[in-house]
Amino acid sequence: MRLTPGPARGIDLDSVDLFDLDLYTAGDPHPIWDAMRAKAPLHHQVLPDGREFWSVTRYEDVCRVLGDHRAFTSERGTVPTHLGTDDVAAGVLLTSTDPPRHTEVRRPIGSTLTARAVKSWEDAIRRTVVRFLEPALDGEPFDLAERALLLPALVTGPLLGIPEQDWEQLVQLTAMVTAPSDPHFRLGSEAATLAIAHHELVAYVTEWVKRRRASGGDDHSLLDHLMSVRPGGAPLTDEEIALDGYSILLGANVTTPHTVSGTVHALIERPEQFEKAQADPTLVPNLVEEGLRWSSAACNFMRYAVDDVDIAGGTVPARGAVVAWIGSANRDATQFCDPHTFDLTRSNAKRQVAFGFGPHFCIGAPLARLTLRVFFEELLQRFGSIEPAGEPEHLRSYFIAGMTHLPIVAQKRRTP
Ligand code: HEM
C-alpha cells in the first residue's frame, strides 16, 4: 500500500470496502482512513458473504479497543483474516487470551525478551546485518524487500533455537498465514493457504518440542526456556509451548522486514532525510520510531465486543467484531502534527502505536527496535546513496502493510 498518500478522490464511506485487497496493492488507503477519522470514526461494513465488522481509526479509539480487554476480548481471535471464525486456540494461544490467563502465559516469554535481555544479542545481530547488507553494495540492483523477508529469521532463528536450514520454509509459511491472497505465497484458495500454513507451522513447532524433549534441550534458546518454566507451579504443556512458539514465529517474521522496506523507501523518496540521518547518527533511534509510525507494518488487529459498547460516537453490539486500524491511528493529526510527512526529527515519534497498546503490546518490541537500530546504523555508515531500481510492489494483504519487491541500487559511502 502507498505510504505517501495521493490526493483524496471521490471517497464514499458508505460503499468503501476495507477488505478489498486491491486497495492495499495498487490503491491508496490513507485518504480513506483520513475521511473515516474525520467523518465516520466508528465505521460499519457488511461483506458480501454477510460477515460484518466495525472499524475504529482514531488514535484514542484504537488504543481503547486494543487496551480494554474487559470491553473488547482477544479470546475469539485477533487477526482480521479469520473474521467470523472463532479461534480454536482461544484461552491457550498467547495472542488469544485475556488477563488474568494472558498475564500468566506471557510472563515466561516476556522475561527473555526484555530490552536488557536482548542487549546481549547486539554484536551477533550487527554481524548478521553487515553480512546481509554487503551484497547490496556490489553495484547491482538489490531487491531489499525480497531479501529482508529473511532478516528476522537470521536474527531470531538462533534466539529461538531453530536450525538455519529450516528458516526459509518457516518464512514462507508465516507469510502464507498473514498474506494468504498474495500471489507470492498463495497455494490454491485463500482458505486452503491459511489452513495448510497454520497446520504445518503448528506441526513444525510441536515436532521441534518433541525432539528437544528427547535430547534434553540446552537451556539457552527461548523455546528451551519455555520448556523449563513453571508458571503457577505447573510446567507448560507441549501444546502450549507449540502455540507460543507459533505466535513468536509469526510476530517475528512478518513485521520487521516491512518496517525495513517502508523506512528505506521513505528515505529514497526524501534524500534530505537520508542526508540528515547520515550527518547525525544519534538520530537513528528516532528514525526507527518514525519508520515504525510511517510503515505501521501490523496494519490492524481485531477484537470482539463483550457486551454492547459505546465508542467513537456509536455503539458496537455485543459479539461484534471491531478492527482497530493501527496504520490510521499513526497518522492521526490530533497526535502527530503534519502526519503524512516523514520527519526523522519528529519530537513525539515514540508515541506511535505500531507495536499495539495495552496487555498485548508487542512482546518482541525490544528485539525489533534493536534490530532496526543496528540495521540503520550500519546502512547509513556504509551506503553513500540509495536509488530506486524499479517500482516497489506491495503485499496483497489488508492485515500486514508491506512490500514484496523494492529494487534498489546503492553506492558505497566514501570514507572521509
Ligand atoms: C517492527 C516489528 C514488529 C511490529 C510492528 C509488531 C507489531 C505487533 C503488534 C501491533 C502486536 C499487538 C497485537 C494485539 O494487540 O493483539 C504484537 C504482538 C506480538 N508480537 Fe510483535 N511486532 C513486531 C516484531 C515482533 C518480534 C520481533 C517478535 C518476536 C520476537 C514479535 C512477537 C509478538 C508476539 C508474540 C505478540 C503477542 C503478544 C501478546 O499477545 O501478548 N513481534 N506485535
Image (tube, rainbow, N blue to C red):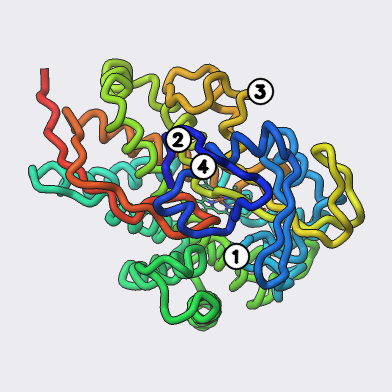
Whether residues under marks 2 and 3 lie with C-beta atoms below 8 angstroms apart, the answer is no
Tell me the tag on residue 81: 1
Q: Height in image: 387 above or below 138?
A: above
Q: Earlier in the sequence, mark 3 or mark 1?
A: 1
Residue located at (63% from left, 43% from top): 356
| Residue 359, horizontal then vertical, whole percent | 73, 47
Q: Is residue 15 left or right of residue 308?
A: left
The mark lying in front, picked from 4 and 3, is 3
The reply to whether the C-beta atoms of the residues labelled 4 and 3 are less than 8 Å apart is no
Q: Name the residue under label 2.
A: 5
Callout 1: helix, strand or loop?
A: helix
Earlier residue among tags 2 and 4 = 2
Distance between the alpha carbons at the discs numbered 2 and 4: 14 Å
SS class, disc 2: loop
Quadrant in the picture for residue 275: top left
Q: In the rendered image, which residue does mark 4 sit on?
A: 296
Q: How far apart are marks 4 and 1 (CA)?
A: 17 Å
Say which label, 4 or 1, has the lower sequence index.
1
